Every structure is written in C-alpha cells, then in structure tokens.
Image (cartoon, rainbow, N blue to C red):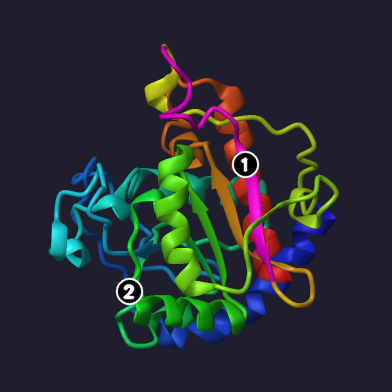
Amino acid sequence: MRQALLIGGGIAALGCSLWAFQKPFREYPAIEYNDFPVPDDYRQPAEFTFARLMYPPAATARFDRAGRYWAQGMSSWTQDYPRADRHLAQALRRLTRINTRSVEQAVNLDDDDEVYNWPWVYAVRTGEWDLTEAQAKRLRDYIERGGFLMVDDFWGTFEWQVFMRSMNRVFPDRPPVDVDNADALFHTIYDLNDRFRVTGAWGRFGRPYQDDGDTPYWRAIYDGKNRVVLAIVANSDLGDSWEYADDPSYPEKWSGLGIRVAVNYIAYGMTH
C-alpha cells in the first residue's frame, strides 16, 4: 500500500497539470454496447483517466462496422468499449490510491494535439489497425515525449503481421522484444511471475485462443534508457477480463490476472 500511495501522489501532480487542456467526455457508438450506464460522477475530473485510442481499420478487420467513418465509432477500436474501460476504472479505485475518473476518453490521433493531454493510452484489436503515416508520426512523437501505449487482444501470425505494418511506421528502428520476467513492468505493484493466457469470454467453453495464437506474448518496445514505452499483450484478451469482471460465469483467474496486469502497466507508465 505504501507503494500505491507514492504512485498516487506522483500521478496527482501530472494529472492536475493536464485538466485545463483535456476535452470533455464524449461517448461513441460501439460494436457491442450503446446503452451502458454512465456513472453519476462522470463529469468529475481526476488524476488519471483511461484513454482509448481510436484508429482506422485495416481492410481485413473483422470487427469494423464503420469503414472510413471509423472516427464516429462502430469500428474495431470500440471492442469491449465502454464496459471494459469503466470496470477497470472501478478496479483502480478499489485497488490503488490513484484518483481515477469513472469514465474513459476516446482519443483520435488526427485531432490536433489532443493525445498529448492523456499520458497513458490503450488500444484494442491492433491486429486490425492501419495507421496513416501522419498518425504514426504523431504516435511516435507522443511516446518520445513521455506518453505510454498499451496494446491488447490480437491473435496469431496474420494479425501480428498487420500490427507490425503500422508499428514499422511508428518505430522502424525499434523492434518489439519479449519482456524479461524481472522487468519492473511485472513488479511495480503486483509480482506477476506466473502469467498465462487470458482468454476472452468467447473461449470459456471452447478453444481458448484464435487462429494460431496459442502462445501468449508479453512484449514491449523500450526507449533509449531501457524503459518500456509501448507494452504489447498478444494472444490474450485482457479487455474481456475487465469487461466480464462482474460476470460469475467468467473465470476469476482470468479477470484477476487481467486486472493486475493493467494496474501494473498503468502505474509503471505513469511513473517511469
């Protein structure tokens, strides 16, 4: 708890400095939810907000419903949204001293300098993204200025290749590497020595992975000071572990690990 107190205090100074520049909350149509309850305190500013990256879909995207209108919602970036985001915000409030906003923020790289106001960003289904050169350039600049990106929920060789096509535009000189078990990323709050594949709700009663993605990968891109700046969770579905954390039929071992990983990644990204 002492560590959580220190982390909460460190985030407070940064969070307060950004409030004046952040855009107000806005909700978008999603491929799974369009009537999920908005908490009563959604207008209350906080030290930390879970920011979700919007992105254009690749031509092969399975979950896109919007095409070139992806910035209006109903696209791959809305997978699990907003239920997963709000459940994770509740978990952060319970498990840490981080003052967390009850609702998420969708962030578009094309929207002027908006992304710079959100120091920690999450992107889902990145095996379906197709960043433009301008978006890739801005994402790299955001990360090099201190931003942190976590990506999650893409499966198998083909989706990894799609993911890497955009990543090579962002960091052509920094390939992802496996994260060593001793890295601080896995020990910032929780010790995550025993990690395993976190399967989505779709895998509860059948095959627990998609395509040929049967081996979970915990990878990252590091900066010049050996700090993780982009955390990659491939062949796992942490988003579902947050989304279904309140569902008795979803295995607790999956939601438990998924939430602990997110807590560590957020604390690490906001303090390193």
Residue 187 lies, in percent from the top left, at 80, 49
Residue at position x 56%, y 71% in the image: 47
Query: Is residue 212 a member of the stretch shown in magenta?
Result: yes
235 to the left or right of 265: left
Magenta highlight on residue 219: yes
Check the image and report above or below for 173 versus 89: below
SS assignment for the magenta stretch, majority: loop
Q: Earlier in the sequence, mark 1 or mark 2?
A: 2
Quarter holding residue 107: bottom left
Is 160 or 237 nearer to us in this picture?
Answer: 160
Q: Residue at x 73, y 51 (%)?
A: 179
Residue 217 marker: 1
What segment is highlighted magenta in the picture?
A: 206-222
Instruction: Tell me the element at label 1.
Output: strand
Q: Please state the horizontal and vertical placement of residue 211, each as a whole percent of the image.
A: 41, 29
- Measured as percent of width and height from the top left, residue 167 is found at 48, 65
At label 2, which amino acid type do we have?
Answer: Thr
Mark yes or no: residue 159 visible: yes
**Quadrant the C terminus occupies:** bottom right
| Badge 2 density bin: few <14, some 14–19, many ≥20, Cα 10 Å | some
The percent position of residue 204, horizontal first and vertical second, equals 44, 17
Identify the secondary structure beneath mark 2.
loop
What separation in Å lies between label 1 and label 2 (alpha carbons)? 26 Å
Q: State left or right for residue 136 relative to residue 147.
A: left
Examine the rendered structure and indicate whether residue 265 appears above or below residue 19.
above
Residue occupying the point 55% across, 73% down: 171
Q: Which residue is mark 2?
A: 132
Q: Nearer the viewer, residue 213 or 203?
A: 213
